[in-house]
Image: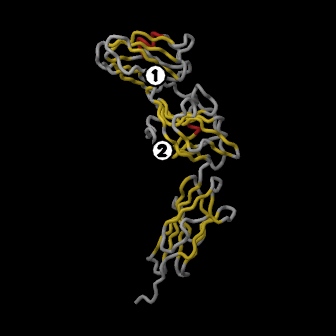
Amino acid sequence: MTRWRWAPVLSGLSVADEDDGAVALTPALDQAVGDYTAVVSEDVDEMTVSATRNHGGASVRIIEGDGTTTAADEATVSLRYGENVVAVEVTAEDGVTAMTYAITITRERPWSATLTVGVNGSTVPASSGFSAYTSHRGGLSEQYVTLDGNRYKVLILMHVAGGLYLGTKTEMPGDFTLHVGDLEFRGSDSSVPVMRTRGAYWWALEDPGWAKDDEVAVGITVPEEPQSMSERPLASPVARFSQLPASHDGSKAIVLRISFSDTFEMDFRTLRDHALEATNGEVRRAKRVNKDSNLKWEIRVKPDGTDDVVITLPATEDCADDGALCTTDGRMLYNTVSVTIPGP
């Protein structure tokens, strides 16, 4: 016959920062409620969790998100950026009846923002994300990253031609991690886009998983111990088509442009006769837009008839191939770009 029954509950539950400052729990403790939240600033990397048993015969375990467990009524837990779940498990005297109180502690990031995705559809492939330049495509709810009391302005966060591009007004002070939804990109793993060497970071990324007008959680975190970044390599060159005609009539030449992010050592014959491919048409001309630069070219393609014309520039796989587009230091054209011009 059972002569008693103590419910495995807490009469007190609290969290405090490194300076013993109390941090509010939401909601306030209710013995029957199992889930709680708390928010701390970016510079709080440890917290003390204290639990008071409702009955002295009960036992308490405090369990961190990584599985670290303590049998004490109080424990100091380490916090990473973002959400940290700490469980307080109370077991009654019978050793069987138990209840768990879960606290989700969110450590704020040095930069957290909502990216509203804008799209520039005037080029192929289209670019998407946020840019403070030209027509201010997309939006960021917060542009400034604050590190060690200094502010760094985010000017660009775009997916462009198979890569993710982050541009800040000044170079970040050291290594960092960029968070985009569930994706993470380490600053030290990035390359440097040739056209802008300061405050510029590029990572290969085929699909960011977003579409126009999507809202994406983004942020930046830094290592607990500051880390400098070693010299980063130059990014691979990419290509984009622009000034595309809406259609062709089957007789007149199709005129469009192709732009490169870096200069290749090539002449018009390389582009016209070997690099570019045309289906239901023939590449008749490749002309520099600026005679002293290989960055922009005007392309003319003669249709074979009224079928759709497909114009493709494949990525380079070997600098020894005919039509290979490589920089003098051996960086190959990274992306394959293709455009379809409808017939009449």
Q: Which mark is residue 242?
A: 1
Amino acid bearing label 2: Glu
Locate the N terminus and report the quarter of the image it occupies.
bottom left
The residues tagged by marks 1 and 2 sit, at their Cα atoms, a distance apart of 27 Å
Helix, strand or loop at mark 1? strand
Query: Mark 1 near mark 2, Cβ–Cβ under 8 Å?
Result: no
In this rendering, position of residue 203 left or right of residue 282: right
In this rendering, position of residue 175 left or right of residue 89: right
At 42% from the left edge and 25% from the top edge, which residue is drawn? Answer: 336
Q: Is residue 75 visible?
A: no
Above or below 224: residue 205: above
Q: Position of residue 141 (x, y in %)?
A: 56, 44
Helix, strand or loop at mark 2? strand
At 50% from the left edge and 37% from the top edge, which residue is drawn? Answer: 129
- What residue is disc 2 on? 215
Give residue 212's quadrant in the image.
top left
Amino acid bearing label 1: Ser
Q: Position of residue 85 (x, y in %)?
A: 52, 60
Q: Is residue 107 visible?
A: yes
At 52% from the left edge and 65% from the top edge, which residue is drawn? Answer: 36
| Furthest-left residue in this view | 306
Above or below 260: residue 104: below
| Label 1: few (<14), some (14–19) or many (≥20) C-alpha neighbours in 10 Å | some
